[in-house]
Amino acid sequence: MWIAGCEAIEEVSTGPGYVTLRASFVDDPSPFGLGGVLTTITDDSWMDQWRAHAQPYNVGRLTVWPSWILSPSTSATVLLIDPRRAFGFDHPTTRLVLADVDRLVVPGDSVLDVGCGSGILGIGALLLGARTAIGIDIESDAMIATHENAVLNDMDDRFAASLEWPATSATYNLVLANLLAPILRELAPLITESMAPNSILVASGLLVGQWETVADWYPSLCVQDRHQLEGWESITLALR
């Protein structure tokens, strides 16, 4: 289903030892021969139903908190997020990259968040000490969500989001790229050129086992670390 281009999969128990898989697609998956029952849905309100079940969670020093739930007083560093229709709340790859950011960010870092979605990764880096962050995405929903979330966290003066790639002369200490593997391949030259000396790239959006192929697309970087969660993987690469 992932290969056929689905955007999400839900597992629904249908009896002892059986589940039904429900997947959403933008394009007709029939050419992939998946079988099953296809239903065309014109009402998109289902896309917001997950919000009723969203819960805060902890990653390292951060507590990620849905902004529509009353935030309690806490000594933790709270990251308020409302992703709207943009990607980036509690997906395993989001958690993986946030955990890497918690381990790797250095006070004063400049951060490039490629495929920023809701802005959660760049904002998390700023809350943990980074100086500035730039977010890039191709979706207008991501621009709206990133700006609103930056305001929620009082980071709108340090986080800018754009539909355009930054100036070619700009480089960053920490680059975050939570993207699918084909996009990581397509953007490899631009990402590499955006890395400052001794900088780090955290790449995710990878199914377990894809890391070696992705690393081959970044020959000037060396793999430092890998982490896995629920069938997904992140890799940390350093500029040689």
Image: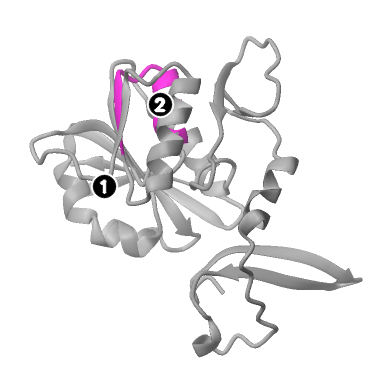
Horizontal arrangement in the rendering, residue 6 relative to residue 178 (left or right): right
CB under 8 Å between callouts 1 and 2?
A: no
Residue 214: % across, % down: 33, 59
* Amino acid identity at mark 1: Cys
Amino acid type, residue under disc 2 in the picture: Ala
Asked whether 96 falls inside the magenta stretch, the response is no
The outermost residue toward the right is 16
Q: Give 124 or 216, whichever is nearer the viewer.
A: 124
Quarter of the figure with residue 76: top right
Of all residues, the one furthest to the left in this rendering is 169
Query: What is the span of residues highlighted in magenta in the rendered image?
Result: 120-135
Q: Going by the image, does 9 lie left or right of 98?
A: right
Res 125 label: 2
Q: Residue at image x 63%, y 75%?
A: 40
Q: Earlier in the sequence, mark 1 or mark 2?
A: 2
Residue 222's disc is 1
Vertical side of 230 occupied by 143: above or below: above
Q: Rounded to the nearest whole Å, what is the CA distance between mark 1 and mark 2?
A: 22 Å
